[in-house]
């Protein structure tokens, strides 16, 4: 974002450390957050490569084998139909992560636009927009999503939209709060009184300063979206067989947990670890970006 | 006055262990305090003056704080090694404290009566009824009217000065021998400050109290203390009798502090202000109000809270006009409405022959090139994500006053102008101290060579010695660039140092106006007289 | 204060109306009807049923009829179980769900607040790290993973507690309540720790210490009220979450509660039951949000007096 790069003489001068660099340095020192980050990167890579690296096909049945505990051929065991569990978890990751990221992107888009417009325009528009958000907060959204999936059948696209449409509310509130707070900051007043154009004020003075909390909240939204999808799939309302997500794997694992405990255990562990990683990363980012920590 | 020693502190060393290593807050501090004496501890922020006193009562957070060595003998008992349970019996009943910001030091969730009486119930074993009666007496003593009724109210129903009176009443309830007052008037308006100081002084005399008075303000120390310690960066620099120290300081730091107290008028300038022509800025009958909203579903404007009422001022080219008033007097609102950061409801603002109050869009944007603002808080007035170079280059490039080949040289000259090293232009605001940031803000304001600068309390957030430097810089720049400036301040001594003419505002209205020295010599309005009386004298 | 409550109740009416309208439109635009069975039903029968339930009327008329009945507290007959009204079904399922949510909430508040307050007083010690790590696990462990695990350990392997039912065998309420409450215990622990830390760093706590008060008095008289404020604002969303969570817990532990009825109704396309339950859930959530707001105002003297001044 700097215009410094155009001026060669400047390159020789000592560089300052920006707040972002400081924050990243702090994040790098946070061991749990970094572990979470590495786990997530690994998981995403595996999920992307699944069609090529998965040991079996996800619907390949082996009825003679039936449910078998972990072994050299099937590292995480097989389910009642003799399907390889590792493969099914890998394919499940694709769906769970896709829902997590895409629905969050939907929520992010709606929330940031809504909150930013309310915050910028202010006055009556702001009051009305936030009243709508308040009213929507009072709704039983989980129930609505169940309703949606029942009514329109459970397609992936619907899941993205429905979950995204629920999760944008908090994002809108956060963005609006930030915009209002920064609008009152004296450096924005200074920019206005220098006669800068509104677009320049927004792009150079507002957005870079709103970005931090948005990133943190995005990181924390992904796990709650993944959880919501798993919740629906667990109730049998989300992903339909033979496709699988973590939630539907856990659901079928619960039915047979007394005999074949590994069918509950492994998908549960993967889901919990993913949620762990995202939450630790989000917490770490928040600590790293917290202005109170960077002031002293 | 007896000469019995009440408290003696020996070799006190306090450190803080932070993420970035250890910082020494207090280093090898020695002092003693006689019964009935008022000791002033003077220093700037970070001098360790508060930490030293807090550690006497075990009030520094530990960790990260740690008392590494030393003794503090109070009645022969070492306070620093006292177990927590015994320390509690010392607090409030033997040694009491009052703090800087009365707005945050009272518990907003509890009634005044509960906060006062718990001291007596815990320490003196009184029952609720007895404690209440004593608490009412204490409130009467510190000058709170209707004490019997007001005692049942919550802190938010009291003004800042009143809250500080409540704090004082609370501190003195259990009749302590030693009172530690930590900057008790810094957060208050100047006229209120004078009242609180005289209240503390009266109570000290009446009760023969021993007092430690912590302050950054030498004037306040001179007024209150018999004996003064001067601290710098955790160390005791100089100590002695108040009168003696202020007349014959031996240490350079003490001299620097004393020089920072402004007692001089603005020096005669080389250029003279021509007041015969039309003024550069002419504000006529300006009214500014803030809308209050109400309504359950849709917001309606209920009424306007008055900010500025019927104010007219003129400002001539090359003139520095001081705008003085206390918080809530509408002085900042006036400043901001002149440059259209706030909209006014009535009246006209003519700047350089053009009416500003109706301007919009590009016309307003172009007009804004000619006036700039310097803000109070140098921590909030710079975008934390832009380097100094970007901050200073932005207005130059946007308004076409520089191109890519000349901008570096122009920024460098601005850095020279405000006394900052050219090498620092790729650094970010958070890497600078408060005084340096204010220099950057000043550089940004003068970058466009504006016809008018509005400075809103630009030095009130700074330490005294830094304040003196920034004021000297502003004085130099007004001379060098023949700046026209509206200088907003609550501090009469600062205004006297910098301004040619002064207007005084109270409750949104203009009450008095005049050439600086004339106004100082013969203030007509009682409010102006009060403001002038509130300047501490050395 | 009274006017504040009245105002909030008035604001809730359009919200409830919108809930009803949206739900109604969604259900009616769904493919398939309540009388779709595996075997073919003669057209006359369907016609009769449609007439009986006024499914042939124009949609807006159906909606208005329905709303006017709802206002009188009548949620209509169930499509799936014609002999029962929705009111009956809700009345049958509600006690178990409410009781379950209540125990879960009590569990969450007791453990969450205790852990949070202790952690805030002993930051960066074992008394902070252990409960806060446990809270992180609690947040990341979904109810539908925790429930089966608890069931497996305490119900199947150890055999200490019953594995299913509600109110039939002593102790059968323990596992479901803990399962449902643990996530909220975790959130409350984190929120109350943060809230207490905020308050404990306030100047007025320093004043209280300078007054020579004991730690117990400082925590309970001076800090707690401000410290638990964020927990109370969390209660509204928490109760909404508890109701949704009861779907899962009731399924796992086979509890005949409203959550299970709702999921079943959703599978069966029992229109009136879905509509009725949704409106009822929305009503409950709005009610508890209102209660939380009233408590927040009541705890804050400044807000309380501003409201009293406005009437």
Image (cartoon, coloured by chain):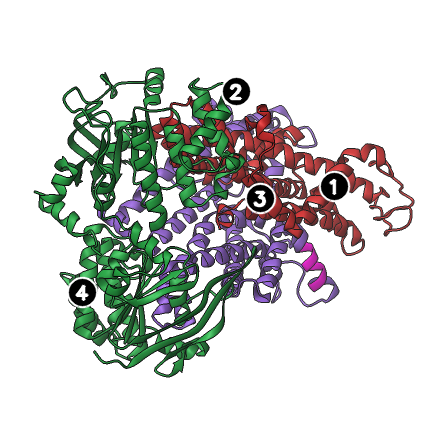
Chain colours: A red, B green, C purple
Res A187 quadrant in image: top left
- Rendered position, A199 above or below B536: above
- Gap in angstroms between the C-alphas marked 2 and 1: 47 Å
- Gap in angstroms between the C-alphas marked 2 and 3: 31 Å
- Rendered position, C15 above or below C138: above
- Rendered position, B272 above or below B189: above
Of helix, strand and loop, which one carries label 4? loop
Magenta residues, dominant SS class: helix
Residue at horizontal 82%, vertical 44%? A85
Chain letter belonging to callout 3: A
**Residue identified by numbered label 4:** B142
Which class describes the residues within 10 Å of circle 3: few (<14), some (14-19), or many (20+)? many
**Residue identified by numbered label 3:** A23
Marks 4 and 2, the one that precedes in the sequence: 4
Which class describes the residues within 10 Å of circle 1: few (<14), some (14-19), or many (20+)? some
How far across and how far down the image is residue B490, in percent? 24, 44
The nearer-to-camera label among 2 and 1 is: 2
- Span highlighted in magenta in the image: C147-154
Chain letter belonging to callout 1: A
**Residue identified by numbered label 2:** B404
Of helix, strand and loop, which one carries label 2? loop
How far across and how far down the image is residue A231, in percent? 64, 43
């Amino acid at each position: 974002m700097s215009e410094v790069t155009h001026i060669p003489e400047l390159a020789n001068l000592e560089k300052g450390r920006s707040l972002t660099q400081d924050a990243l340095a702090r994040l790098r020192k946070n061991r749990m957050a970094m572990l979470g980050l590495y786990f997530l990167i690994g998981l995403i890579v595996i999920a992307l490569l699944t069609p090529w690296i998965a040991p079996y096909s996800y619907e390949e049945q082996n009825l003679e084998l039936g449910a078998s505990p972990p072994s050299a051929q099937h590292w995480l065991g097989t389910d009642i139909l003799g399907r390889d569990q590792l493969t099914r978890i890998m394919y499940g990751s694709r769906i769970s992560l896709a829902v997590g990221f895409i629905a969050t992107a939907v929520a992010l888009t709606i929330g940031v636009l809504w909150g930013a417009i309310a915050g910028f325009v202010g006055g009556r528009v702001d009051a009305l927009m936030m009243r709508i958000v308040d009213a929507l907060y009072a709704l039983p959204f989980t129930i609505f999503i169940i309703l949606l999936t029942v009514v329109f059948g459970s397609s992936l696209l619907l899941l993205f939209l429905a979950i995204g449409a629920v999760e944008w509310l908090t994002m809108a509130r956060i963005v609006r709060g930030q915009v209002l707070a920064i609008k009152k900051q004296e450096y924005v007043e200074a920019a206005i009184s220098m006669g800068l154009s509104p677009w320049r004020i927004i792009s150079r003075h507002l957005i870079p300063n709103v970005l931090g909390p948005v990133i943190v909240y995005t990181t924390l939204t992904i796990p709650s979206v993944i959880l919501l999808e798993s919740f629906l799939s667990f109730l049998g309302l989300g992903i339909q067989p033979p496709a699988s997500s973590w939630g539907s794997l856990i659901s079928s694992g619960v039915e047979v947990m007394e005999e074949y405990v590994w069918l509950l255990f492994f998908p549960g562990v993967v889901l919990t670890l993913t949620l762990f990683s995202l939450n630790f990363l989000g917490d770490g980012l928040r600590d790293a970006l917290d202005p109170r920590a960077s002031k002293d | 006055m007896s000469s019995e020693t009440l408290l003696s502190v020996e070799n006190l060393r306090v450190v803080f262990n932070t993420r970035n290593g250890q910082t020494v807050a207090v280093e090898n501090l020695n002092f003693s305090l006689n019964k009935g004496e008022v000791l002033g501890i003077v220093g700037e922020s970070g001098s360790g003056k508060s930490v030293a006193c807090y550690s006497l009562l075990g009030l520094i957070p530990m960790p990260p704080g740690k008392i590494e060595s030393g003794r503090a003998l109070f009645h022969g008992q070492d306070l620093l090694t006292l177990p927590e349970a015994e320390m509690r019996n010392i607090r409030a009943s033997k040694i009491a404290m009052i703090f800087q910001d009365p707005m945050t030091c009272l518990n907003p969730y509890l009634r005044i009566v509960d906060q006062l009486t718990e001291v007596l119930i815990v320490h003196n074993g009184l029952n609720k009824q007895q404690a209440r009666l004593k608490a009412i007496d204490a409130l009467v003593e510190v000058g709170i009217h209707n004490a019997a009724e007001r005692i049942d109210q919550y802190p938010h129903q009291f003004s800042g000065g009143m809250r500080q009176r409540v704090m004082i009443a609370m501190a003195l309830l259990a009749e302590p021998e030693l009172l530690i007052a930590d900057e008790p008037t810094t957060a208050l308006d100047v006229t209120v400050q004078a009242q609180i100081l005289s209240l503390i002084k009266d109570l000290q005399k009446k009760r023969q109290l021993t007092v430690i008075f912590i302050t950054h303000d030498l004037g306040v120390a001179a007024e209150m203390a018999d004996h003064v310690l001067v601290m710098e960066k955790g160390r005791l620099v100089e100590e002695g009798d108040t009168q003696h120290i202020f007349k014959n300081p031996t240490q350079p730091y003490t001299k620097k502090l004393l020089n920072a107290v402004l007692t001089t008028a603005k020096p005669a300038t080389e250029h003279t202000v021509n007041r015969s022509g039309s003024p550069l800025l002419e504000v006529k009958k300006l009214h500014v109000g803030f809308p209050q909203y109400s309504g359950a579903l849709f917001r309606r404007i209920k009424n306007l809270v008055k900010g500025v009422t019927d104010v007219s001022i003129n400002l001539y080219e090359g003139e520095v006009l001081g705008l003085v008033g206390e918080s809530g007097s509408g002085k900042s609102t006036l400043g901001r409405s002149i440059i259209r950061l706030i909209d006014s409801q009535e009246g006209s603002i003519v700047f350089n022959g053009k009416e500003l109050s109706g301007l919009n869009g590009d016309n307003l944007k172009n007009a804004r090139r000619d006036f700039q603002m310097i803000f109070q808080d140098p921590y909030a007035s710079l975008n934390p994500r832009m380097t100094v170079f970007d901050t200073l280059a932005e207005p130059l490039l946007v308004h076409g006053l520089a191109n890519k080949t000349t901008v570096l040289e122009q920024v460098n000259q601005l850095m020279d102008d405000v006394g900052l090293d050219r090498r620092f232009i790729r650094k970010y605001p958070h890497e600078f101290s408060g005084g340096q940031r204010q220099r950057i803000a000043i550089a940004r304001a003068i970058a466009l060579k504006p016809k008018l600068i509005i400075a809103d309390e630009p030095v009130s957030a700074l330490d005294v010695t830094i304040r003196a430097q920034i004021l000297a810089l502003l004085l130099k720049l007004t001379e060098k660039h023949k700046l026209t400036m509206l200088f907003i301040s609550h501090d009469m001594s600062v205004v006297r140092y910098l301004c040619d003419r002064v207007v005084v505002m109270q409750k949104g209205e203009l009450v008095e106006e005049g050439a600086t020295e004339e106004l100082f010599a013969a203030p007509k309005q009682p409010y102006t007289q009060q403001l002038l009386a509130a300047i501490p004298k050395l | 204060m009274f006017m504040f409550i009245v105002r909030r109740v008035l604001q809730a009416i359009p919200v409830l109306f919108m809930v009803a309208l949206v739900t109604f439109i969604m259900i009616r635009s769904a493919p398939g009807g309540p009388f779709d069975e595996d075997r073919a039903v003669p057209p006359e029968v369907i016609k009769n049923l449609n007439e009986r339930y006024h499914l042939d009327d124009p949609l807006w008329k159906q909606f208005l009829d329905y709303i006017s009945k709802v206002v009188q507290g009548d949620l209509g007959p169930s499509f799936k179980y014609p002999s029962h009204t929705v009111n009956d079904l809700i009345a049958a399922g509600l006690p178990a769900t409410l009781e379950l949510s209540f125990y879960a909430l009590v569990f969450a508040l007791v453990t969450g607040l205790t852990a949070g307050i202790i952690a805030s007083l002993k930051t960066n010690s074992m008394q902070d790290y252990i409960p806060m790590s446990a809270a992180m696990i609690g947040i990341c462990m979904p109810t539908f993973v925790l429930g089966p695990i608890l069931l497996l350990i305490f119900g199947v392997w150890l055999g200490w507690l019953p594995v299913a039912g509600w109110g039939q065998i002593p102790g059968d309420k323990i596992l479901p309540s803990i399962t449902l409450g643990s996530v909220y215990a975790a959130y409350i622990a984190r929120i109350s720790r943060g809230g207490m830390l905020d308050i404990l760093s306030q100047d007025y706590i320093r004043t209280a210490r300078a007054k020579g008060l004991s730690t117990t008095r400082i925590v309970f008289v001076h800090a707690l009220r401000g410290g638990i404020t964020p927990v109370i604002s969390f209660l509204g969303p928490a109760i909404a979450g508890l109701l949704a969570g009861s779907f899962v817990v009731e399924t796992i532990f086979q509890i005949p509660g409203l959550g299970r009825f709702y999921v079943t109704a959703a599978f069966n396309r029992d229109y009136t039951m879905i509509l009725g339950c949704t409106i009822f859930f929305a009503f409950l959530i709005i009610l508890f949000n209102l209660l939380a707001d009233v408590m927040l105002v009541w705890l804050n003297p400044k807000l309380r007096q501003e409201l009293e001044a406005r009437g």
